[in-house]
Image (tube, rainbow, N blue to C red):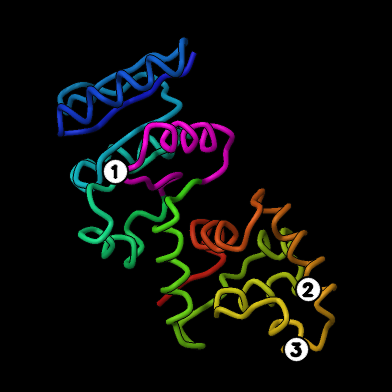
Amino acid sequence: MKKVLIIEKDMIFREGLVQVLKKEYSDVEIDIFQPSRYLSDRYHLCLVDVWSYEEHYTVINQLQMLGVKVIVFLNSFNAEKDKLVNGALISAEGILLKTMKIAEVIKALNTISQDIQYYHPLVAQLIIKQLKKSNKKSIELQRSSLYDSFLTQRELDILQLIAKGLNNNQIAEKLTLSPLTINSHMRRIFRKFDVDNRVSALVYALKNKFIKIN
């Protein structure tokens, strides 16, 4: 049975989420967050609106430390994209928009339940745009023995160049390698990150601090 915690101030949207979850998942158990209640239950997912995420950040951080997958709903992409630019939401497993169709929300929830991050395309593209705007000195690779054992030096080099907006042919020219060799390295990075595209790879790298934007 999946246990879901909803932290949402908008009663109409909150009830809509409850109905969608109950209709889609027969074994779901749903709790509505109450600030005065001690959270002793183990949850699989936490669905939270962006304002509650900030207001109850300590609680949400504790949930994440327990392995709960947190999914943030933005009320408006344009109004709240500053929170994405400054990285305030990057620790979330998913960032969705309240304007998404029900089928899209269900697809996102199923993806996240399989331990794969899901960011709405507008969110992912904004992150990529910010990376491309960053100058050479502002993009840093975070190095540690753990990361060194996870990615090879060549994979780290390629990841850094992807973050600067270079395509595979440009990376090949920069590293004096063939495009086929770059493609092979890219596939290995995707496999290690459990993703299937460059955007998801960069989101994963940001979330797990392989890349830092100053």
Magenta segment: 92-117
Q: Which element type, helix, strand or loop, lies under badge 3?
A: helix
Q: Is residue 155 magenta?
A: no
Measuring from the top left, give residue 95's x and y in whole percent. Answer: 38, 47
Task: Choose the circle earlier in sequence order: 1 or 2.
Answer: 1
Residue tagged 1: 99
Q: Which mark is residue 182?
A: 2
How many C-alpha atoms fall within 10 Å of the one at disc 3: few (<14), some, or many (≥20)?
Answer: few
Q: Residue furthest top?
A: 26
Q: Left of 48 or right of it: where is 198?
A: right
Q: Tell me which label, 3 or 1, sits earlier in the chain.
A: 1
- Disc 3 marks which amino acid? Glu
- Asked whether the residues under the numbered discs 1 and 2 touch, taking CB atoms below 8 Å apart as contact, a structural biologist would say no
Q: Position of residue 25 (x, y in %)?
A: 46, 16
Please give the label number shown on residue 173: 3
The label shown at residue 175 is none
- Which residue is at 50% across, 62% downward? 206
Q: Residue at x 69, y 77 (%)?
A: 157
Tell me residue 40's x, y (percent): 34, 20
